[in-house]
Image: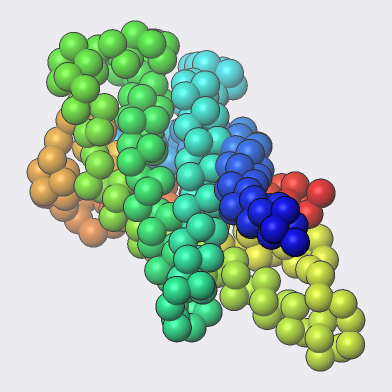
C-alpha cells in the first residue's frame, strides 16, 4: 500500500509537468506554422504603419511596390527567420501560461469560467509580451530595411546594431506598447476562441451528439479569435511598430501619428491585418488542438 501511494504521488507530480511540456511543444509548432502563413501580410501591415500615406497611399500600392522592387522572398519574407522562432516561443509561452493559470484558478479560486478565461488570457498575454518585444523589434526593422536609403540587413547585424546603439535594454524598445497590446489582446484572443468553441459544443449536446468539436468549428473559432485580437488592439500595435522602427517613446509615437494623420493613422494597415488574421489563427488553434488530442 505504501509503495502504491508513492507511485500515485509521483504520477500526480509528473502530470502537471507533462501537461506543461505538451503545451510548450504543441504551441511552438502551431505558432511557427501560423507565422509562415501570416508573414507576407504582416510585412505590408508594418510598412503601412511606419511609412506615410505619401509613400503608400493604399494597401495595394504597398503590395505592388514591394513585389516590383524587391520580389517575393526579399520583399514579403524579409526577416522571417526571427519571427518564426519568436512565434514558436510566443505561442509556447501563451498556451502554457494560459493553461497553467486556468488550472490554478480552477483549483484554488471560485472564479466563474468566464473570469478564468479573462484572467488567464491577460496573464498569458503579459508573459508573451516579454518574449515578443525583442523578436518584433528585429522583425520590424528588417521589414522596412529595404525602403528609402536603408540597405537590406540580416538578423544578427540588426541585433548587433541595436546592442551597440542602445545596449541590452534597447531590445525591449516598445515594450510598453507590446504589453498593452498582448495583455488586452490575450483576453480577446482566448475568450473569443473558448466561447465560440463552447457554443458549438453546446449545440452538439442539444442535438444529442458527442462533445468533440468538428474541424470547421475549430477553424471558425480560431479565425474569429484572430479577428477579435487584431481589431481590438490595432492602435497599440501601430504605436509599437512606430516605437520600434523610429526608437520613439509611447507618447512621442502617439503624438507624431496624430499630427501627421489623425486618428485614422492608428488604423493604417488594419484591412490587410484582418485578412491575414483569419487563416493564420485558424491554423494556430487547429494545429494546437489536433496535436493535443494525439
Which quarter of the rendered picture does the N terminus lie within? Answer: bottom right
Location of residue 114 in the rendering, given as x and y in whole percent from the top left corner: 49, 79
Within the image, what quadrant is residue 248 found in? Answer: top left
Q: Is residue 156 left or right of residue 82?
A: left
Q: Is residue 75 visible?
A: no
Is residue 155 shown left or right of residue 34? left
* 204 versus 235 height, above or below: below
Q: Residue 160 appears at what percent x and percent y?
A: 28, 11
The percent coordinates of residue 99 (x first, y second) are: 54, 59
Looking at the image, which residue is at 51% across and 57% down?
100
| Residue situated in front as seen by the camera: 83 or 232 | 83
Where does residue 258 sit, x and y in percent of width and height?
16, 52
Rendered view: 272 above or below 202: above
- Which quarter of the picture shows residue 208? bottom right
| In the image, farthest residue toward the front | 2
In this rendering, is residue 5 above or below 173?
below
- What residue is drawn where x is 59% and y is 66%? 193
| x 37%, y 48%: residue | 127
- Taking depth in this image into account, of 116 and 222 the one nearest to the observer is 116
Amino acid at each position: 500500500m505504501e509503495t502504491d501511494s508513492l507511485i500515485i504521488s509521483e504520477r500526480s507530480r509528473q502530470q502537471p509537468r507533462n501537461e506543461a511540456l505538451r503545451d510548450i511543444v504543441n504551441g511552438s509548432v502551431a505558432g511557427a506554422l501560423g507565422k509562415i502563413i501570416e508573414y507576407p501580410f504582416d510585412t505590408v501591415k508594418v510598412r503601412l504603419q511606419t511609412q506615410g500615406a505619401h509613400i503608400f497611399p493604399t494597401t495595394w500600392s504597398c503590395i505592388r511596390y514591394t513585389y516590383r522592387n524587391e520580389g517575393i522572398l526579399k520583399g514579403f519574407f524579409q526577416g522571417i527567420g526571427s519571427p518564426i522562432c519568436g512565434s514558436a516561443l510566443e505561442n509556447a509561452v501563451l498556451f502554457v501560461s494560459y493553461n497553467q493559470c486556468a488550472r490554478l484558478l480552477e483549483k484554488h479560486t471560485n472564479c466563474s469560467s468566464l473570469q478564468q478565461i479573462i484572467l488567464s488570457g491577460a496573464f498569458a498575454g503579459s508573459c508573451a509580451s516579454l518574449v515578443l518585444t525583442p523578436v518584433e523589434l528585429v522583425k520590424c526593422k528588417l521589414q522596412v530595411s529595404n525602403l528609402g536609403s536603408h540597405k537590406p540587413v540580416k538578423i544578427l547585424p540588426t541585433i548587433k546594431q541595436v546592442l551597440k546603439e542602445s545596449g541590452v535594454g534597447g531590445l525591449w524598445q516598445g515594450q510598453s506598447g507590446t504589453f498593452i497590446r498582448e495583455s488586452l489582446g490575450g483576453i480577446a484572443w482566448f475568450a473569443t476562441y473558448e466561447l465560440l468553441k463552447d457554443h458549438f459544443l453546446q449545440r452538439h449536446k442539444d442535438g444529442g451528439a458527442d462533445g468533440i468539436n468538428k474541424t470547421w468549428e475549430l477553424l471558425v473559432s480560431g479565425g474569429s479569435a484572430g479577428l477579435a485580437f487584431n481589431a481590438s488592439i490595432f492602435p497599440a500595435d501601430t504605436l509599437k511598430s512606430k516605437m520600434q522602427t523610429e526608437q520613439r517613446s509611447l507618447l512621442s509615437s502617439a503624438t507624431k501619428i496624430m499630427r501627421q494623420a489623425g486618428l485614422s493613422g492608428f488604423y493604417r494597415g488594419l484591412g490587410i491585418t484582418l485578412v491575414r488574421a483569419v487563416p493564420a489563427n485558424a491554423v494556430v488553434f487547429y494545429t494546437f488542438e489536433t496535436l493535443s488530442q494525439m
